[in-house]
Structures are given as C-alpha cells and as structure tokens.
Amino acid sequence: MKKVIFVLSMFVAFSGSKVIAQKNVSFGPIVGVNFSKLTGNQIYNNWKTGSTAGIFINYSGESRFGVNGQVLYSRMGGESPNGASKGHLDYLQIPIMGTYYLNDRGNKFRPKVMLGPYIGFLLKAVNENDVSINPEGSTRPFKGVDGGAAMGAGFNYAIGRMVWLNADVRYNLGLTQVMNTVSDVHNRSWGINVGLSFPLGQYSPSTGTLR
C-alpha cells in the first residue's frame, strides 16, 4: 500500500508540474472493457472479460507528439478452458504512454498511436466465488507488482469547445512474472477504452484548440 501511495503522489506531482509549466493539458475519466489471461498458468490460461475505470491526464505539444498518463483500476486474470473457474486479479495500473497523432493540431478528428510502459499493483486476487486465491503466508502465490508494455491505437474527436472524446484499442504485454510459486506466468490483455478530456491549464493562442 505504501508503494501505491508513493506512485500516486508522484503521478499527482508530475501532473501538477505539467499544468504549471506547459500548455495544452487535459484530463478526464476513462472506462473500458478488457480481455485477459495468464499465460503459463495451468488453470487461468483462457481469455476472460473484465473492466477498467480511472482517470487520465494528457499533454499534447505543438508537434504531433504528446504524453498520456493514467491511473486505472483494472480487473484482469483469466479463466479455465471450460469457463468453470475464474481468477480475478484486480490491479491499480499506471501506464505512461507516448502518443503520436497522425495529423496536425486544429483537426477535429485526430487518429493516434500509443506506446509506453505500465506498472500494476495487485489489490486483490479472488476466484469466481469472490474467495481469495492469494492467501497470506510466507510466500503468497501471486506477486504484488506487475510491469510491462502498453501499446495501442485510437483517436481523439472534438465534441465541444475544448472537450474531446478519446477512444483506443490497447494491448498490454506483461513482462514480469505474476506468480511466486510458478515460473513463466505473465499477464496478457487487450481492451477497448473510452474517455472524455476537459481543459486544464493554458492553451496555445496560435490555434485556440486543445490539441
């Protein structure tokens, strides 16, 4: 929990510095659906549907490049081949992604591609009956921290004055081992996310738009 609080504090501090020092900053809520599995796990190695919700802050520069940081509550894990058993791994995920827009600022519709690292802190691990599958002990089955790479593509669409619809399809590639008791078990997931961004801070007088 101390690690979670520390990372959240750093995220807020980073966000605040961007607002003060930079232009064209936005923030807002984000929700989505994800499909995840645990590769290398004998039970939870099939795709399972989960959900994602959180907040994001976005910086879009004068060029086509930007940065997007998010704090997400994501239900991941996997299910058995017959669907009878499910493992729900709830993470507090923090992806930081570089963004490249495929057209210039001033356009109402802006396609984009994204790439960057993420870190996740395990909040709880339960089965389909909401019973813990990560009991306390000398060695818990599931590790408390996960890390990997997030990549995706999507678009931003202006729906009002400095208000944008953000949508993307994303793939998360877990690069760290998820379990203490079994080797070579990794998170894999892809998802569809939708959010709304609202203005925060200053804006470029050259265009008068958020991006």
Image (cartoon, rainbow, N blue to C red):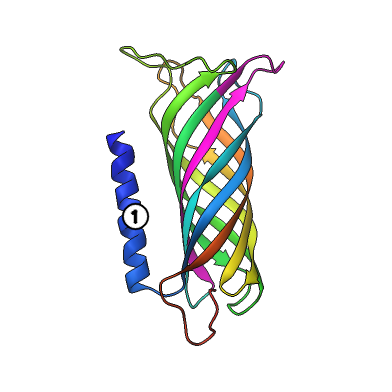
Type of amino acid under label 1: Val
Q: Is residue 81 magenta?
A: yes
Quarter of the image with the C terminus in it: bottom right
Q: Is residue 86 left or right of residue 149?
A: right
Q: Which quadrant holds residue 48? A: top right
Q: Position of residue 51 (x, y in %)?
A: 59, 37
Q: Is residue 199 left or right of residue 46?
A: left
Q: Position of residue 145 (x, y in %)?
A: 39, 32
**Residue occupying the point 33% across, 73% down:** 21
Q: Is residue 111 magenta?
A: no
The residue most toward the bottom is 206
Few, some or many C-alpha atoms within 10 Å of disc 1 (few <14, some 14-19, many ≥20)? Answer: few
Q: Secondary structure at mark 1?
A: helix
Residue bearing the label numbered 1? 12
Q: Which quadrant holds residue 103? A: bottom right
* Up-down relation of residue 158 to residue 115 (above or below): below
Residue stretch in magenta: 64-87
* Up-down relation of residue 90 to residue 31 (above or below): above
Q: Position of residue 203 (x, y in %)?
A: 46, 78
Q: Is residue 29 left or right of residue 79?
A: left
**Residue occupying the point 28% across, 43% down:** 6
Q: Position of residue 149 (x, y in %)?
A: 49, 45
Name the main secondary structure of what is drawn in magenta. strand
The residue most toward the right is 82
Quarter of the image with the N terminus in it: top left
Nearest the eye: 27 or 109: 27
Nearest the eye: 20 or 153: 20
* Up-down relation of residue 119 to residue 140 (above or below): below
